[in-house]
Amino acid sequence: MLISMLPLTKRRQALPVLVLVLSLAAQAQVRVDSIALGQDMVTLSWRGGHGPYLIETSPDLATWSDLGEPAATTTRTLRAFGSRSYYRVTDLDPAGQCGQLFGLIQTEQGEFGALLGRHRLKTRLWLYRTQGPPHTSPSPTPASFWRKLFVHYQRIEDGRVRTWSGPLEELGAVATPTSERLTITWARGSGPDLRNYVLTLGFPYPVNNPRTTSPFPSDARYALECTHARPQPELNWWTPGLSTTTSDEIGLMQLDPANDPANPDHAWWVRRHVVSKNGAALNLHYFVGMPLYRGESLWILKTLLLDRWLSPTSGSGGSLPAFSTDSYFAQTLLPGHHNFFETVLIEPGLDPAISEATCAALFASNIRQIYALKDLGFGLNPDDLFYIGYDNLIRDP
């Protein structure tokens, strides 16, 4: 393992920054070429390794969280608001197993599901073909094709964003309970923190029969379930307050790459609005769109899904300490039927770029999560905004 440490000092603030560059194999060494510091930003450039690469950050060298997502580029500009920041650059494929990117599968942020469960189980799966069989075979069986895919699995674990990398079959126990289903099961934690996961891939064809048709990432219908030993909070829709659950479930899907906020035909899919109440306000800017199924755009007659966040979400005013976040894992969308209304849940503390001072202010104000609802259908209902505290109590601003 190669570790390079470069102590730096932020201009004007005279605050120390330490950059660690890690390579997980001697044959894939990663070395920093340059580090540039700006106001609340740091740009890292490096060379070596195979990639994709992941940037992680820590305030204390003890707890690490992903900052952004895996990418093949060797230059990254990051938000850096902490008084003391540590970074490490990790080559996620030191042995060079990844071939062509097969597709990105991520949480389906559409109409159905529970908001807090979706937020807890937020997932992104980058799927890669490997360099050898079965991905170089002319007619592999779907079961062997999918289980050998190399995956970067990014999720929230223990309050941090973490990434696991390896062949899908090494994530957990693989089974084919029916001729058209593939399941992977695994567990994390122990005792009251035990969590049991099941990832199910449902196909429109038998998975153990060879196929000559090239597969698409969206051939499968993906579902992820988690059973918790410790009850987890969930919002009641019928009365204000929280109930508890020991089971979360989400769908996952591939988004249509033709979704484009710059396309005039998609202009009405762009959301830019403010949700405010009692002096507190959230500024939201995101884009909804279509998913793919079997490689084709799936027109949804009911509800459009979250495609991406277009600019950072910010909040301030009244009892709400000022913050800004562009983290995928710190914000979750749950649209209503036909997008007549859309709800957003923000948890700033999941963004590792949030400063210690901002986190402390939110904790002191007992604001763990912020719920916002916008009426987009008829404008007959007022905006709603409330806080969910660290004590699991709901209150207005």
Image (spheres, grey):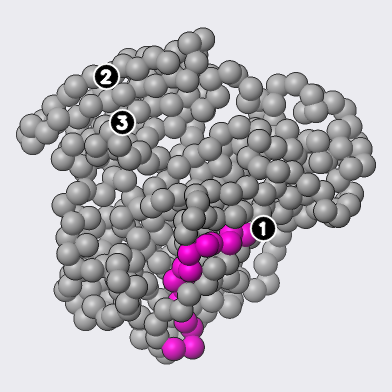
Identify the element where label 3 is drawn. Answer: strand
Question: The C terminus appears in which quarter of the rendering?
Answer: bottom left
Q: Is residue 227 magenta?
A: yes
Q: Earlier in the sequence, mark 3 or mark 1?
A: 3
385 relative to 196, above or below: below
Q: Position of residue 114 (x, y in %)?
A: 53, 71
Q: Position of residue 231 (x, y in %)?
A: 48, 69
The span shown in magenta is 225-239
Q: Check the image and name the residue furthest to the top.
A: 27
Identify the element where label 2 is drawn. Answer: strand
Q: Position of residue 62 (x, y in %)?
A: 30, 36
Q: Earlier in the sequence, mark 2 or mark 1?
A: 2
Q: Image point 29% across, 45% down: which residue?
A: 353
Residue tagged by mark 2?
A: 5
Q: Earlier in the sequence, mark 2 or mark 3?
A: 2
Q: Position of residue 320 (x, y in %)?
A: 20, 68
Asked if the residue at tag 1 contacts the one at tag 2, i.e. Cβ–Cβ closer than 8 Å, the answer is no
Q: Can residue 279 be seen from the camera position used here?
A: yes
Mark 2 and mark 3: span between their CA atoms?
10 Å
Which amino acid does the dot numbered 2 rest on? Met
Is 243 on the left or on the right of 218, as rendered?
left
Identify the element where label 1 is drawn. Answer: strand
Which amino acid does the dot numbered 3 rest on? Tyr
Q: Can residue 252 be seen from the camera position used here?
A: no
Which amino acid does the dot numbered 1 rest on? Ala
Q: Is residue 99 magenta?
A: no
Question: The N terminus appears in which quarter of the rendering?
Answer: top left
Name the foreground residue: 271 vs 126.
126
Report the disc number at residue 87. 3
Residue tagged by mark 1?
A: 223
